[in-house]
Amino acid sequence: MRTTLNIDEKALEAAMEVSAGRTKTQVVNEALRSFARGRRRKRLLELRGKIAWEGDVDILRKRR
């Protein structure tokens, strides 16, 4: 999807220096995926202690 954005030039340059992406589009997409992954992880961690889990970790480990 084509979108017009006003992006902080210095922030984009800094991201491009540390990213594996070669183009601005690749770097922005990588940053968006990373942002979403971090937020999903945060929501998952907020559930800690709120859900009862019944299972046997040893059995799960043996399946490997």
Image: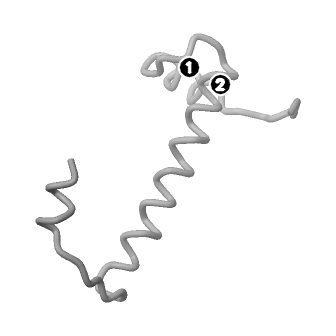
Q: Residue furthest top?
A: 22
Give the percent coordinates (x, y) of residue 19: 47, 21
Q: Residue at x 46, y 53 (%)?
A: 38
Amino acid carrying mark 2 in the image: Glu
Q: Residue at x 36, y 86 (%)?
A: 51
Q: Gap between marks 1 and 2, in whole Å?
A: 6 Å
**Left or right, residue 29 beside residue 62:** right
Labelled pair 1, 2 in contact (Cβ < 8 Å): yes
Dot 1 surroundings within 10 Å: few (below 14), some, or many (20 or more)? few
Question: Which residue position is annotated with label 1?
Answer: 13
Q: Residue at x 47, y 17 (%)?
A: 20
Q: Residue 60: which quarter of the image?
A: bottom left
Q: Residue 44: which quarter of the image?
A: bottom left
Q: Residue 9, which numbered label?
A: 2
Query: Residue 11 versus residue 46: which sits nearer the camera?
Result: 46
Give the percent coordinates (x, y) of residue 48: 32, 79
Q: Residue 50: which quarter of the image?
A: bottom left
Q: Residue 22, which numbered label?
A: none
Dot 2 surroundings within 10 Å: few (below 14), some, or many (20 or more)? few
The type of colouring in the image is: one colour
Q: Secondary structure at mark 1?
A: helix
Q: Secondary structure at mark 2?
A: helix
Give the percent coordinates (x, y) of residue 49: 29, 85
